[in-house]
Amino acid sequence: MKKWILSACIVFPALAHAQSGEFVLNGKLGNLNAPAKAYLDRREGSTIILDSVLLKDGAFSFKGKVDGPLMVMLMVDHEGKGTSNPEMDKRIMYLEKGKITLTAKETLNDGEITGSPINAENERYKKFLTPFDEQMNSINKEFGASTDAQRNDTAFMNGLSRRFHSAMGDKRELMKKFVAANPNSFMSVMALKELAVHLNMDLTVLEPMYKSLTPAIQNSEAGKEFAASMEKERNLAIGANAPDFTQNDVNDKPVKLSSFRGKYVLLDFWASWCAPCRAENPVVVKAFNQYKAKNFAILSVSLDQPGKKDLWLAAIKKDGLDLEGWTHVSDLKYWSNAAAVQYGIRGVPTNFLIDPSGKIVARNLRGEQLETTLAGLIK
């Protein structure tokens, strides 16, 4: 069954807290044997680590060190097809100091995690969000059962879209309630980080919520990390000078953001693997063709992955983005892209409209809003 597409591709943030040290993750998934393989995908700072181990009688184990609770993706390939297997069994969970055990019969999500306080707290948080999950399951079920004719019916798809956006609004309210009711919970920081993506880092909403947390949570590594992200956001506010950076273009030639001074420039963060970005590209192409002769340019920064330059270039060509006056750059470091880190990018697509003097004049312009804003600024 297809899933309803989210309106942005969002990074799962690495979260750190107290209690650093060694972890052991022991798993038992039925009676699976090789070639079935388990994978542990985690991000430590700017480094992405992917460990793997074959299953024997359903058992697998991972060991390592963490600086505190760390969000990871545990995956099991039941058939041994490799990481590209679309049917990969997946579960988001946390690593922390100590011995963690996951026991499941058929799928990872059916399993029980023991020996881990942070995973127990995460389950409590997930249960709090159950009303949202029920709404999304209903939407996904209806979409999955729909006919081709219904999917081509504007009224039908608009109805699902309205329900989707309503559900996302309800989720935001649930996250706000959780933070208010749980000021001493590590998961409240997690909720704030996700809200920051949904609310485009709106400090008027997020900062009071952060200040409502207990000193212990504020002073945790995760709390201090969130405070630092809010400070970075202040430097990216409307009217601020756009931070300068340099990255190589498709021909490996360095391009500097400040070289666009004197023009309106749309700084667009995207990636070839991001479905919402690709869906938005026709809108951006239309706006570019309308204003390219009126002192307007686009600088697209791709968050494509290491070794995947061919996919980046193919997406540029397929989406019709290879136009004169439209510059593409990337360091091919995925979510660790230096410019993306500098601009606090937590989800794509994200964009900044910069005026000829180098100041940020608008952010996250999507759909008709992009053309309307350009029409008001560029005469």
Image (spheres, rainbow, N blue to C red):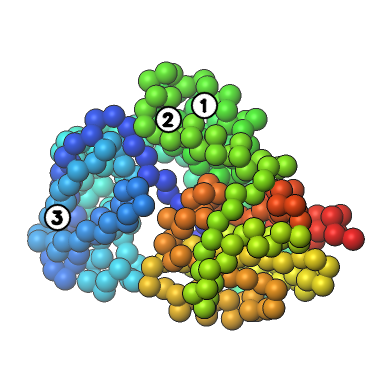
Q: Mark 1 points at which residue?
A: 210
Total number of numbered discs in the rendering: 3
Question: From the viewer's perspective, is 328 left or right of 97?
Answer: right
Where 327 falls versus 260 (above or below)?
below
Q: Residue 10: x, y in percent?
A: 50, 52
Q: Dot 3 surroundings within 10 Å: few (below 14), some, or many (20 or more)?
A: many
Q: How far apart are marks 3 and 2 (CA)?
A: 33 Å
Q: Is disc 3 placed on a helix, strand or loop?
A: strand
If you read the primary sequence from the N terminus, does the residue marked by circle 3 or circle 1 appear first?
3
Residue type at numbered disc 2: Gly
Disc 2 crowd rating (10 Å Cα; few below 14, some 14-19, many 20+) is many
SS at mark 1 in the image: helix
Amino acid at pointer 3: Phe
* Image height of 181 relative to 189, above or below: above
Return the residue at label 3: 60
Q: Nearer the viewer, residue 154 or 246?
A: 246
The residue labelled by disc 2 is 223
Question: In front of the other: label 3 or label 2?
Answer: 2
157 sits to left or right of 69: right
Residue 113: x, y in percent? 24, 41
Amino acid type at circle 1 is Tyr
Q: Which quarter of the figure has residue 275? A: bottom right
Q: Which mark is residue 371?
A: none
Tell me the residue at 81%/58% (across/down).
374
The residue that appears at 38% across and 72% down in the rendered structure is 307
Contact between labelled residues 2 and 1, with CB atoms less than 8 Å apart:
yes
Q: Which residue is drawn at 19% across and 43% down?
A: 65
